[in-house]
Image (cartoon, helix red, strand yellow):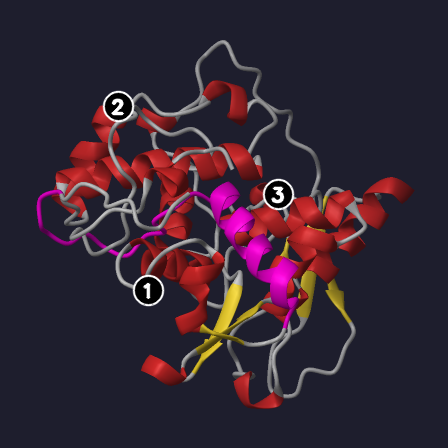
């Protein structure tokens, strides 16, 4: 798009932090950075030109913020000295030879933003109606009405793109029933992202929810009654779950655990290893970041933690 186009202004206000664009669009934007500079540092002042914006103010700044919330870029420095770098997670999304690893990386990125983790923990794959969500977001989470509409659309699009939850979640919740003429914005409800970045076409905390052994997220509580799947949907049959400690040396910390319905097939085992490799940026840190007695690292099924 031409960065000279001036998006329409909307009512001022402020909502909690959330990505200004959906994950699919964020991956397209980080892909433009990767195509130009791979994983070399990029002065943030030069980013608007890569995306055909005139300046870092407004939409360009909001897109940079969204990439950081999804874990697609790392940054250092401040103001004029700030530099961003395409993250390992983003490179896995864009270039990993394994489709399973790319899928796992998409799911990891989708749940990086804190607000996404909270929504997933509360509702899982089965969101209530938009009217229900808007009421809760404006009254319980201090969203503005416009911010709530924009966030709900972005979250639905991101869930669909990352294929979060049950296999039928994408078909059950494809798109949002919000009007398409609402521009997507960032957490500061003072200016929108341009229309190019608002459509489905094309950093949160370092400990997103745990993966189960089959590539899905399981670090959430059961969805409330209002978010239950329709009665016509088949309820998965419960299977026995086993938990195994992994015998590695963790000084002053509980063991790493894996939990699931074992044994796995050879194909499932290969997928499990690919998922772990894709999650390395989340699970592995330098020695200074290790916190003793912080609880076990647990990868398992939802049944094991319910």
Q: Per the image, is 18 magenta?
A: yes
Note whether residue 303 is visible: yes
Q: Which residues are magenta?
A: 10-39
Q: CA distance from mark 2 to mark 1?
A: 28 Å
Q: Report the front residue among 83 and 215.
A: 83
Residue, disc 3: 216
For image coordinates 14% across by 44% down, the residue present is 9
Q: The N terminus lies in which quarter of the figure?
A: top left
The answer to which of 90 and 305 lies nearer the viewer is 90
Q: Residue at x 59, y 67 (%)?
A: 87
Quadrant housing residue 146: top left
Q: Would you place residue 174 above or below residue 66 in this image?
A: above
Circle 3 residues within 10 Å: few <14, some 14–19, many ≥20: many
How crowded pointer 2 is (Cα within 10 Å; few <14, some 14-19, many 20+) is rated as: few
Residue 164 visible, this orientation: no
Mark 3 / mark 1, whichever is N-terminal: 1
Which residue in the structure is indicated by mark 2? 179
The answer to whether residue 2 is above or below residue 159 is below
Give the structural element (helix, strand or loop) at label 2: loop
Badge 3 marks a residue whose secondary structure is loop
Asked whether, in this view, residue 219 is left or right of residue 279, the answer is left
Q: Is residue 272 magenta?
A: no
Residue 56 numbered tag: 1
Discs 2/3, front: 2
Residue 275, above or below 297: above
């Amino acid at each position: 798009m031409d960065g000279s186009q001036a998006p329409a202004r909307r009512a001022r206000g402020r909502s909690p932090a959330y990505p200004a664009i959906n994950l699919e669009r964020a991956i397209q934007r980080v892909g433009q950075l990767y195509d130009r500079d791979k994983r070399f540092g990029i002065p943030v002042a030069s980013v608007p030109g890569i995306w055909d914006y005139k300046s870092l103010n407004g939409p360009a700044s909001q897109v940079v913020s969204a990439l950081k919330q999804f874990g697609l870029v790392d940054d250092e420095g401040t103001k004029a000295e700030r530099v961003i770098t395409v993250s390992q997670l983003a490179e896995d999304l864009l270039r990993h030879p394994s489709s399973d690893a790319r899928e796992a990386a998409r799911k990891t990125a989708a749940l990086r933003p804190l607000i996404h983790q909270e929504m997933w923990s509360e509702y899982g794959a089965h969101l209530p109606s938009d009217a229900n969500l808007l009421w809760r977001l404006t009254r319980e989470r201090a969203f503005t009405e416009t911010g709530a509409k924009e966030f709900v659309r972005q979250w639905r699009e991101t869930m669909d793109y990352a294929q979060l939850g049950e296999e039928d979640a994408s078909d059950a919740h494809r798109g949002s029933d919000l009007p398409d003429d609402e521009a997507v914005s960032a957490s500061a409800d003072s200016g929108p992202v341009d229309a190019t970045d608002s459509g489905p076409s094309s950093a949160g905390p370092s400990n997103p929810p745990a993966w189960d052994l089959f590539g899905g997220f399981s670090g959430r509580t059961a969805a409330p009654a209002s978010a239950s799947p329709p009665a016509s949907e088949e309820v998965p049959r419960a299977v026995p779950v086993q938990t195994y400690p992994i015998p590695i040396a963790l000084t002053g910390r509980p063991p790493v655990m894996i939990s699931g319905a074992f044994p796995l097939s050879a194909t499932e085992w290969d997928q499990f290893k690919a998922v772990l490799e894709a999650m390395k940026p989340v699970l592995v840190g330098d020695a200074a970041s290790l916190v003793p007695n912080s609880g076990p690292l647990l990868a398992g099924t939802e049944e094991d933690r319910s």
